[in-house]
Structure formats: C-alpha cells, structure tokens
Amino acid sequence: MDRIRIVGGNELHGVIPISGAKNAALPLMIASLLTDDTLTLENVPHLADVEQLIRILGNHGADISVNGRRERQGESYARTIHFTSRNIVSTTAPYELVSKMRASFWVIGPLLAREGKARVSLPGGCAIGTRPVDLFIEGLTALGAEIEIDGGYVNAKAPEGGLVGGRYVFPKVSVGATHVLMMAATLANGTTVIGNAAREPEVADLARCLNAMGARISGHGTSTITIEGVRSLSGARHRVLPDRIETGTYAMAVAMAGGDVILEDTEASLLDTALEAIRRAGAEISETNSGIRIVRNGCGIRPVDIVTDPFPGFPTDLQAQFMGLMTKSTGVSHITETIFENRFMHVQELARLGAKISLSGQTAKIEGVSRLKGAPVMATDLRASVSLVIAGLAAEGETMVSRVYHLDRGFERLEEKLTRCGAHVERVSD
Ligand code: EPZ
C-alpha cells in the first residue's frame, strides 16, 4: 500500500496548477444520465472517485470515452470525458458500487426522472458522520415519488406520467440533496421551487450545465432555486469549475511552510471566507490574472477562530487543513465543526506530530506550538489526510502518512505539485 513521505522544513516557491473540482465533476457526470445525447465534460480531474463513478455510470449503460490528452503539457492532467447514456440498461445501483462512495447515491435523481424508477443502495463514503438520506427522500416525495427502504436499498417510483413539479424547503442545507432534487425536477411536469437550497458553487455549476442541456433553472447560487420542467434534455459541452478545496488546501500549505506561490487556474471568489481566515493568520493573498498569489515571509502564524458553515461560510472540507495550520500558531485558536458530527479524526494524528489540541463537543481548542516533529501518521479520511501533509511540511524530520488511498480520492498528483515548489514529498510504494 502506498505511503507519502514528507521531510519538513522547506519553503514553497513556484506555481501550482489547480484541478477541476471533484465535487462539481461528480454531480455533472451523474447528470449525463438525464439525456440520451452526449454530455462532454472538460477539466475533469484524474481521481479515484471519478474512476469509481465511471464504473457506476457504466453499470447503468453509459458509454464513456476519455480523452487523456494533457491540456497543457507537463502541467495539467485534466481530461475531457464524453458520456452517452443512449439507453439506461439498469435502474439499480448495487451495494458493491454505492457503498464505496456516497455521491454515487445521487444517481437516484436522474434514474427516477428519466426511467420512472430507481433502486439504489444506501450509501457509504468517508466516515465523518452518520450522513442519512432523509432529505433526499422528503424532497423526491414532494415531486410525487413513492419511496420505501427495504433490505438496505431505497426503492423509488415516479407516478404514472412522471414526476410532478412541487415545492420543498430543506429543513437543513444539503449539497447532495439539492443536486438530486434539481436534477430530478428538470424532467418533471410543471415547476419546482426548492427553498433553503445549498448555495455552494458546485450546485451553481451543475445548474449551468443542466441549462446548457436545455433545462430551465433559475436562482442557482441563491437559497431559492426554481426549475421549470422540460420534456427532455440534450447533450452539451461544459467545463468543470476549479476546485476551491484544493485551492484552499495549497494556500494553507504555503501559509504553513512559508514561501511565495501562485495557484493557477482558480478563482478567489470561490473561497472568500477561507482566504480571509488565511489572511488573518498572516499570509498575504492577492489575485493575479490566472489565479491567486499567496506569500508568507518570516512572520509567525497568528491564531484565528473559525466555525464551519454551508457556503458562503468557512467550508467543512477545509476544516482539517486549517487545524493543521493552527497547530503552529503563536497562540490559542478554536475551530467549531457544525456540518458533520465526527469530523475530528485528524486530531489524534496531528497530536502524534506534537500538536496540542483538546476537544469539547464540536469545538477543538488548539494551543499553537513552536515546533512539530515528524512521526508516522495515518490518513483517516480525504481532508483529514491532507491536514497531516500540511503539518508534515512544517515538522522537523520525517513524517510518513499511511493509507494514502484517502488522499487519492480527491487530490490529483499532490506529491508532484508540492515537489515542484520545493517541498520534500514523495510517494513510497511497498
Ligand atoms: C457534500 O457532501 C460534499 N461531497 C462533501 O465533501 C462536503 O463535506 C459536504 O457536501 C458539505 O459541504 C460532494 O460534493 C461529493 P450534505 P454531501 O448533504 O452532499 C446532513 C469531501 O471531502 N444530511 O451537504 O453528502 C449530513 O449528514 C466531501 O469532498 C442529512 O441529515 O453533504 C450533514 O450533516 C466529504 N440528511 C449535512 O446534512 C440528508 O438526507 C450536510 O451534508 C442529507 C444530508
């Protein structure tokens, strides 16, 4: 099993190309099931989760061809992928496939809208909380679906003549359930209004792609989304938006290690709240023509308190990385996690490197230390694992991160991107 070896102490200098967003690519790929035409997605990152979803879509009958051409030689491995689901050959998404990745549960929306039925295994995914599916069920029920859970599967059936437009106000913001309800409503009879919808940029990106396919969606990016149903959707060509979580992760890596790096092909407006927190911690951040420049010279890392929240708040997917940064701050900081109830598994691993963190309910108190020391650590989930890399960059000596398959789910060529900026990071295969 691969491990990542980091020898800390080097500053980062150079350019890091930011990949297309995993969390946009996944729902966009699933949206291809809504049409019998070809959906072409550009800037798709090369990640384990994308490969897994390709297998899942293939199981439903999607014909998928990958154009492996690098968009810019030596810098980006972004791929263009064509998805054609001429016929849906199965409306069942089996346990063996869905249990590996929670987002694959989202096929329930397009299958139900297009075929009138779906049988989808209850999902798996990172062990960061219980992550139920009640909001999906309530939302789809509001569009007329009949749903029952039986033997670990969600069985959904549309009324005769298809789903019908409806009104649903989410009692809690859910990115995935917003994606699903929006996709399902595109082919419903009549108009659907979704209240308290997720405002994440990935939701807006999906809406833009669906509109390019002929859907009639408005209000995306706000908390009220309106969808006028259409009879069918066509193919389209769409470019996946930049990965704001990868952007924030490397910005925090530079803030931690020191140096001067340009994050290329990304946009500051995707992560204003996180960039503001990094600025307050002492890094200088400016926008360039192609992305973001981040500089930290000499000064210590200042303690900053954050609370995770749905967009435009501080993203839960950057919480672990920010904690990594705060371990070396010059004072005491507090991090409160409000989205997932079990997203502090990185705490005990960061402690192996010498971090001083105590937990009280959903809040972590981090007492900054002046030195971290390299140690063997274990990745526990995708974002937790990269927080260990960030801490390792500033730790003395060698940090060896095991279980890096978590990292490979969401970070494209991490070791290469960091090494090119002067870090000592390598993949070790046993
Ligand atoms: C998406 O997950 C992301 N995944 C997550 O990123 C991200 O952490 C999360 O949104 C929050 O921003 C993808 O986009 C593929 P939610 P999702 O539904 O949609 C509760 C990463 O590291 N809830 O917005 O699954 C849920 O338990 C991943 O890239 C219900 O209670 O998250 C959580 O507490 C991890 N009932 C909260 O809502 C439901 O039916 C928000 O979850 C659905 C969700």
Image: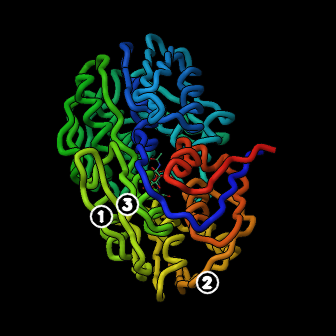
Disc number for residue 356: 2
Kind of residue at disc 1: Ile
> How far apart are labels 3 and 1 at the CA level?
33 Å
Rendering coords of residue 302 (x, y %): 41, 82
Residue 421 position in % (x across, y down): 49, 52
Tell me: residue 120, above or below residue 177.
above
The amino acid sitting under disc 3 is: Lys
Asked if the residue at tag 2 contacts the one at tag 1, i.e. Cβ–Cβ closer than 8 Å, the answer is no
What percent of the width, then of the height, locates residue 12? 48, 59
In this view, the mark in front (2 or 3): 2
The residue drawn where x is 36% and y is 57% is: 173
The quadrant where residue 228 appears: top left
Between residue 59 and residue 287, name the one nearer to us: 287
The label number, if any, that marks residue 172 in the structure image = 3
Label 1 sits on a secondary structure element that is strand
- Depth check, mark 3 against mark 1: the one in front is 1
Q: Where in the figure is residue 231, as x and y percent of width and height?
A: 26, 19
- The residue type indicated by label 2 comes to Lys
Q: CA distance from mark 1 to mark 2?
A: 28 Å
Secondary structure category for the residue under label 2:
strand
Q: Residue at x 39, y 69 (%)?
A: 296
Instruction: State whether label 1 is within 8 Å of ligand 1.
Output: no
